[in-house]
Image (cartoon, rainbow, N blue to C red):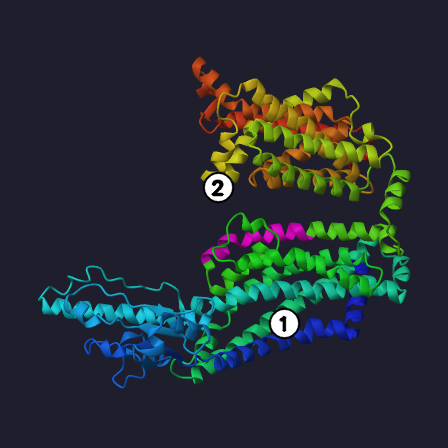
Amino acid sequence: MSWSNVLLIFRREGMDQLRDRRTLFMVVVFPILLYPIIGAGVLQFAAALQEKPRRVVVVGAERLPKEPALLAPEGEGFNPSLFDSPAEAARLTVERRADAGEWANPAFREEAVRDGDASAVMVIPADLPEQFAARADVAIPIHYRSVDETSKITYLRLREALDRWKAGIVEERRKGDKLPEGYARPIEVRGLDAATTQEIGGSVWGRIFPFLLVLMSLTGAFYPAVDLCAGEKERGTMETLLISPAGRAEIVVGKFLAVLAASVTTAVLNLVSMGVTGLQLARRATAMGGGDPAREAAAALAPPTLQSALWMVVLLIPLAAFFSAICLAVAAMARSMKEGQYYMTPLYLVCLPLIFLTMAPGIELNAFYSLVPVTGVALLLRALIVGDYLTAFRFFVPVLLPTVVYAWLALRWAVDQFSDENVLFRESERFSLVPWIRGVIRDRGPRPTSAQAVLGFALIITASWLFAQVLLTTGLGGIGVVAAGQGVILLVPLVMAFLLTTDPAGTLRLRGAAGRYFAIGAAAAVAVKPLSAEFERLVQWAYPISDATRSVFESLLKGDTPLPLAILVFALVPAVCEEVAFRGFILSGLQSGRRTRSAIVLSALLFGLLHVFLSLFQQFFNAAILGVLIGLLAVRSRSLWPGVVFHAVNNGLAVATGAWIGLLQRAGIAGWVYRDAEDGLYHVPWVVAGAVVVAALVLHLWKFDRRDVGEAG
């Protein structure tokens, strides 16, 4: 790749963006305007939403005792001492009504609350003085309307005032009975807030700003990407660019850098605008006095510290790179600016749930969320804004590295899009289901396309999940559900191979293989077992399995299930079904128009995702790594069956581990093999030996067993 060409494309696209008024507005002007408008709106709304006094009708107030007083001396409000501040008491006005006529009717009181004539109606019982004299319990009814926010808040404040009034009555009784002070209050709860001033100030921004920042990063990347792809097609300059000396990858990287610059600029301007707005709000808060709600709202919007802002900028670069590459790849499919706008909706629909997840209560940054695209970044941004540096620094690298990997994969996808003439110069086409199906069958080739391979994976996930839900409602046992689910995984690639290709057997790699590949598959499965055990322990340490999930999976093997049946269902059946799907149909499709090593890695990642959706998230890592080894074995042997052997032996060893360890323990030699037999952990020499054997086998397959030198390019 010539970086001079890349920089030339970058300068060209950057200058084009500076000439586009819409892009300049979205990237530069809109972020500058957004946060001052939000800040001004917060102050105005806070001032407009200052609570007006709520009307509370007290029926039979004449029966209330003078000490302790529930109402203020003038009788138009409640006793201020029953609230946290006089301002709180002033928000409730009292209207006294005699317990006679209309107000004596409960239906009328409810209607008054329903019609908004009163936020709440408190009824003082007629026998209140007698009950107080007898020191009996008294029930004070309060009519309110729970679906009305004002009425509900009024009710809660009345409950708080009555609780304190009740405490005063108890205190009077204690004094009358000459009991010790701690008699009626043996326990006093004192809330000690551990949150720092910065954490309190950043709590609002911590909820709102990650959402806005991620959304603006996506918006800042999408509009320039549409203009650089669909806009060039409309202007007729795409062809001129493609015949230039710059290669397709160089063109994509140059455009990517231009879009990345726009996205980062948008995000940074959002950050700066937010900080300036927060500072202005803080100054306004200092100028305001008392407990004004506007002052409280402004104080809550204090900006993040400079240290947090710098870390956020570092974090935003890979996030913007991810969005830029995704948007560039999607925008390459658009034939016009108008069509490019349509593609914005699916991107938002995918990203918004990932962002909204961070606003849900109880969602905190952990090892799992650090791997989730967009969500991990948003949660880390929240931790930085709030000032939770312990969490932020602990997960900064676990969030940053996956984001960089996702950005690289998205950039590779964008390069693939620009390398496909059918994508760049797609013509308008009418869609009709029957002719389309006929065309697909008529024009099918010996192998599926990459798009068909990805479609097959999506169909496998969807059909397997839906089928499993149906089976679970029938009361079928765990083994039956697993076997039926594997049948679905097998059925989808078989049907697609016969419908979409002219050589189903070749697509699924059902041909035979040399005997050495079967030996390599079996030996690699045995040798990798000590490594897998160590890796699984590391994964479970980083991503612990909940007790509920563990019990569900352990229940699948409970009971009187014979070991041969368990090996058949959990080892042999998945080996055949999953290999037909992933090293057969999907790997063959991904190899179409793609380098073999990329196809192997992508098929392995999809294989890992299968275990995420249908099994355990923790199985993703082990399945993806082993998927690379099985994919290499399938490509070198040009057959599915050596991979089936590896898969079956690997799963069989996992299923039979308990029986195998029991056999070794009875023979008295388990200590020679395992350092921790309960967890299946081998002694270090066995782990090292396994690593050496696996490395030698992989090196042999990758370097010295090439039937086609260009195969692994």
As measured in the structure, the alpha-carbon distance from the residue carrying label 1 to the one carrying label 2 is 39 Å
Residue 394 within the magenta-colored segment of the rendering: yes
Residue furthest left in the image: 178
Kindly indicate the quadrant of the structure image that contains residue 597: top right
Kindly indicate the quadrant of the structure image that contains residue 459: top right
- The residue at the point 27 percent across, 82 percent down is 72
The three-letter code of the residue at mark 1 reads Leu
Residue 249: % across, % down? 80, 53
Nearest the eye: 291 or 429: 429
Give the label on residue 544, or none.
Answer: 2
- The residue at the point 77 percent across, 68 percent down is 14
On the rendered image, what quadrant is the C terminus found in?
top right
> Visible in this render: residue 193?
yes
SS type, badge 1: helix
Q: Which residues are magenta?
A: 390-407
Disc 1 marks which residue? Answer: 269
Nearest the eye: 669 or 658: 658
In primary-sequence order, the first of circles 1 and 2 is: 1
| 542 relative to 598 in the view: left or right | left
Residue furthest front in the image: 101
The three-letter code of the residue at mark 2 reads Pro
Nearest the eye: 54 or 87: 54
